[in-house]
Amino acid sequence: MTQTLEGSRGAANQAGAHINANAYAEAQDFLPIKGMDHVEFWVGNARQAAAYYRALWGFTPVAYSGLETGVRDRTSYVMRQNDITIVLTAPLTPDGEIAEHVHRHGDGVHDIAFAVDDVASAWRETTTRGARSYLEPTELDGGDDGTLRRSAVHTYGEVVHSFIDRNEYVGVFAPGFRAVKKPAAAAKGMDLREIDHCVGNVALGQMDEFVAYYRDVFGFSQLIHYDDKVIHTEYSALMSKVMTNGNGRIKFPINEPATGKKKSQIQEFLDWYLESGTQHVALRTEDIVKTVRTLRANGVEFLGMPHEYYATLGDRVGDVGVPMETLEELGIEADRDEEGYLLQIFTRPVQDRPTFFFEIIERHGSRGFGVGNFKALFEAIEREQAKRGNL
């Protein structure tokens, strides 16, 4: 049963947004997921990508795999900050699936990996419900470090979901990796705690297909539905549904473009990524002001909001613990619903193609995704699209 969001200061902007108050209870328990294990990016140059995330984003390199560890086809760097683990993997040869992936898509998300207690059960439950297998249940022998178990299935585009069981493994990341000793110092001043959500972009007409996929195959439930009455400007629109697992630790918005006068940001992503894929990953912070100040000083580029957005923001959201002039100075957006409020900001694409980007989000009760900001955000993205000649 769904109910329309109401009772918040921004209710007038939320017509067409629907939240399922029973989403967590409705999610099935045949696939217990403890949380996000890691996100793996396939990139053109892992060494340089690792330097970028260390020097600008404050991630520490903790593990390495490559020629020096006996791996001949790829190089991987494991980067960590608090409970966020990202893996950066690049091909060592011009052949194979990693090289083909980078050639076709540019840098992008390959694997959104889940922590589970039983990879065989997770693989069996999902494949018997219709998932296409990517990796059958496998045991990786780490010698004195124990055994790591893994399996994986496909989802939209070329993205996969791995299931990872570390219960009997004490190594740094996985067999075949070695710890990075005396890593170069990571940038300081960030407060990035965990992955809040991952957003997938799919082609027109595929959103409901993948909503059903996560419901039927993974046991997820629909938390929120935003239609094109909410997410639109004069020129473009999109539709989005948010899927969640039973404990709420995994949240996946799934977007598709809607018909408009010009190309939406979703269609731009699809045109340049060349198929469905992960559009952005949201990183949760408990101090967005400090984090964004530091990231900006380090050279990370964010979308900007016009003065007009902040001129009326206080009336819409009330007190959010940060002065309006500070929010405007840094380009941070705010939104409020009946559960609380949130602060958020979006980077520009972090590679040459206008595809993948990051969101930084600070939550104070709200489980939403900033519906009151959608119009202003879309207009900001359209300004960027126009500069690129893609609107």
Image (cartoon, rainbow, N blue to C red):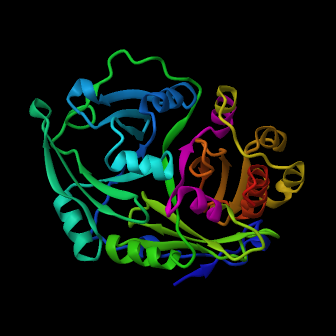
| Coordinates of residue 54 in the picture (x, y in percent) | 50, 27
| Whether residue 151 is situated above or below residue 212 in the rendered picture | above
**Res 288 visible:** yes
| Coordinates of residue 170 in the picture (x, y in percent) | 20, 34
Quarter of the image where one finds residue 87: top left
* Quadrant for the C terminus in the image: bottom right
The verdict on residue 193 being magenta is no
**Res 366 visible:** no
372 sits left or right of 193 in the view: right
Residue that extends furthest to the front in the rendered view of this protein:
94
Residue numbers of the magenta segment? 266-294
| Coordinates of residue 195 in the picture (x, y in percent) | 48, 48
| Whether residue 198 is situated above or below residue 227 in the rendered picture | above
93 sits left or right of 1 in the view: left
322 sits left or right of 135 in the view: right
| Whether residue 238 is situated above or below residue 380 in the rendered picture | below
Count of numbered marks: 0
| Coordinates of residue 58 in the picture (x, y in percent) | 52, 28
User: In the depicted view, which residue is nearer to us: 343 or 59?
Assistant: 59
User: In the depicted view, which residue is nearer to us: 102 or 314?
Assistant: 102
The verdict on residue 268 being magenta is yes
Quarter of the image where one finds residue 187: top right
**At 20% from the left edge and 57% from the top edge, which residue is drawn?**
119
311 sits left or right of 173 in the view: right
**At 65% from the left edge and 26% from the top edge, which residue is drawn?**
298
User: In the depicted view, which residue is nearer to us: 68 or 220?
Assistant: 68
User: In the depicted view, which residue is nearer to us: 362 or 378?
Assistant: 378
**At 67% from the left edge and 29% from the top edge, which residue is drawn?**
299
Residue that extends furthest to the top in the rendered view of this protein:
182
